[in-house]
Image (tube, grey):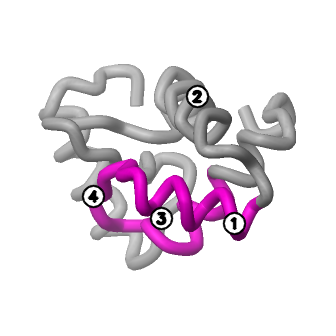
């Protein structure tokens, strides 16, 4: 998956890995604005890229909030990672 990412996907995913790894987050206007400044992409591109990352299962969405898929990136122990994966699968992401 990572080898096929375009520049915008790498920038957005990298930003999210740095600031949102392990927590649920919302892609608010203020977050898009901050991301736009830091990674030099316009806000619309960021929103479109988040949707692409979700389709690639790099991000998981539940009840309007996103979380980085722990299958690809996770901070913590292996047990915590497995627990997170189990929770995501139980929430309905069978492809994660």
How far apart marks 2 and 4 lie (CA) works out to 19 Å
> Element type at marker 2?
helix
Tell which of 70 and 24 is nearer to you: 24
| Mark 4, other Cα within 10 Å: few <14 / some 14–19 / many ≥20 | some
Q: How packed is label 1: few (under 14 Cα within 10 Å), some, or many (20 or more)?
A: few
Q: Marks 4 and 2: in contact by CB < 8 Å?
A: no
Q: Which tag, 4 or 1, sits closer to the chain's start?
A: 4
Give the x, y percent position of residue 31.
45, 61
Residue at point 26% right, 55% down?
A: 84
Instruction: Give the SS element for disc 1.
Output: helix
Q: Mark 2, residues whose alpha carbon is within 10 Å: few (<14), some, or many (≥20)?
A: few
Q: In what quadrant of the picture does the C terminus appear?
A: top left
- Up/down of 72 relative to 90, above or below: below
Which is closer to the viewer, label 1 or label 2? 1
Please report the residue visible at 83 percent of the width from the left and 29 percent of the height from the top.
Answer: 4
Q: Is residue 79 left or right of residue 9?
A: left
Return the residue at label 4.
24
Mark 1 or 2 closer to N-term?
1
Residue on which the image places disc 1: 37
Q: Which mark is residue 48?
A: 2
Query: Magenta stretch containing residue 28, yes or no?
Result: yes
Horizontal and vertical percent position of residue 58? 53, 39
């Amino acid at each position: 998956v990572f080898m096929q990412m375009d520049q915008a996907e790498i920038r957005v995913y990298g930003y999210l890995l740095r600031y949102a790894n392990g927590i649920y987050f919302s892609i608010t206007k203020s977050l898009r604005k901050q991301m736009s400044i830091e990674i030099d992409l316009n806000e619309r591109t960021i929103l479109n890229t988040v949707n692409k990352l979700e389709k690639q299962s790099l991000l998981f969405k539940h009840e309007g909030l996103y979380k980085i898929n722990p299958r690809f990136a996770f901070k913590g122990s292996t047990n915590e990672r497995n627990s997170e994966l189990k929770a995501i699968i139980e929430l309905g992401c069978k492809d994660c």
